[in-house]
Image: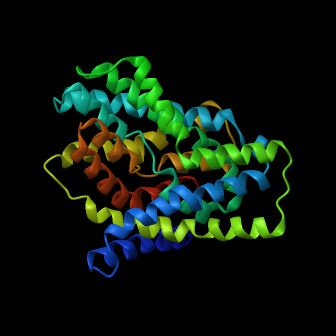
């Protein structure tokens, strides 16, 4: 238990530090978006590129881990939609937004720092193999579903085109693509280039955690907190539980490797859930509440999953 606390405490202390700095006006609230943009658009792509070029990525690309992760995510998506429709009487568009909030994981700003802290750099190739498909699979699934379900939806072809553009314009995808090209071409990084990428990579953890903590000041509990709580439970408990069952009980993946994918699935809802909701103007308050509840609640649930996975 002390080991788990030693892993979790610095992570959430950095989040609390960011939250408190913005809350007490010691750091400008408008600067948080710029900080997160730096992490997403510059520092993390450098981390992804360097990690892929210098790791054994081919052996880390394991369908027995990637498959259960995304099967679990899509099941959670459908479950969230069903509960939002039947349990809370939402319109189809809002229900899809709620389901998306329970499906889309904060893989970069929270997932990478926690998994790297818990399991070291050996976990990164497996984690990156999941992150590389994250936006393409889940964003496309969400956009296609909401266009099919809401009454004012556009054509499926246009939806796929928009989804493709959003995925292709993501700097994280650029970093992963460049890293895979470098890996398979046998690229060797010169020392100055490697030093530059390493310094950029080292900025990811503190900047990401400080940024996500500061961003929590934007999200306030509203009357939709019950729906958000359900979506947060789906994200923090149901998703990793499905991944655990499929990886360990069904596919018999060794725990030493499976735990990377299971723990990543236990991360809270990502900020893209809110972006998705505001883009379609459906369930934005539920998405914001889900991010807030899931991020705060993940301090307990991630500790529990670390214990279940025996750290």
Colouring convention used in this rendered image of the protein: rainbow
x and y percentages locating residue 24 in the rendered image = 27, 80
- Picture layout, residue 272 above or below residue 71: below
Q: Nearer the viewer, residue 89 or 34?
A: 34
Q: Could you say which is closer to the camera, residue 4 or residue 57?
A: 57
**Is 116 left, or right, of 30 in this rendering?**
right
Q: Quadrant of the C terminus?
A: bottom right
Q: Is residue 245 visible?
A: no
14 relative position to 223: left or right: right
Question: Which residue is at 48% across, 64% downward?
Answer: 208
Side of 56 relative to 297 (left or right):
right
> In the rendered image, is residue 165 in sight?
yes
Q: Residue at x 28, y 65 (%)?
A: 217
- 298, above or below 86, in the image: below
Q: Residue at x 45, y 35 (%)?
A: 139
Question: Where residue 279 appears, x then y in whole percent?
Answer: 31, 39
Could you tell me residue 47's position as x and y percent? 65, 59
């Amino acid at each position: 238990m002390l080991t788990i606390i030693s892993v979790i405490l610095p992570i959430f202390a950095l989040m609390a530090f960011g939250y408190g700095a913005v809350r007490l006006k010691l750091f400008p609230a408008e600067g948080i978006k710029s900080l997160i943009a730096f992490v997403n658009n510059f520092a993390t792509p450098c981390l992804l590129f360097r990690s892929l070029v210098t790791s054994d990525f081919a052996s880390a690309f394991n369908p027995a881990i990637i498959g259960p992760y995304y099967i679990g995510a899509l099941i959670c998506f459908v479950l969230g939609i069903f509960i939002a429709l039947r349990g809370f009487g939402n319109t189809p568009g809002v229900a899809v937004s709620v389901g998306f909030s329970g499906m889309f994981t904060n893989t970069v700003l929270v997932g990478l720092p926690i998994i790297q802290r818990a399991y070291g750099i050996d976990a990164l190739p497996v984690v990156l193999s999941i992150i590389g498909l994250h936006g393409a699979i889940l964003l496309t699934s969400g956009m296609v579903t909401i266009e099919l379900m809401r009454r004012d939806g556009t054509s499926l072809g246009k939806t796929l085109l928009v989804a493709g553009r959003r995925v292709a314009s993501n700097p994280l995808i650029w970093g992963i693509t460049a890293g895979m090209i470098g890996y398979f071409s046998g690229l060797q990084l010169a020392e100055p280039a490697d030093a530059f990428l390493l310094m950029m990579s080292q900025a990811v953890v503190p900047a990401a955690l400080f940024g996500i903590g500061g961003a929590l000041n934007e999200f306030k509990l509203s009357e939709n907190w019950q729906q958000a709580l359900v979506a947060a439970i789906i994200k923090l408990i149901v998703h990793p539980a499905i991944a655990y069952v499929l990886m360990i009980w069904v596919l018999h993946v060794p725990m030493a490797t499976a735990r990377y994918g299971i723990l990543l699935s236990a991360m809270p809802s990502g900020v893209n859930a809110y972006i998705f909701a505001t883009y379609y103007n459906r369930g934005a308050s539920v998405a914001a509440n889900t991010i807030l509840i899931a991020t705060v609640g993940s301090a307990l649930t991630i500790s529990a999953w670390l214990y279940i996975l025996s750290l």
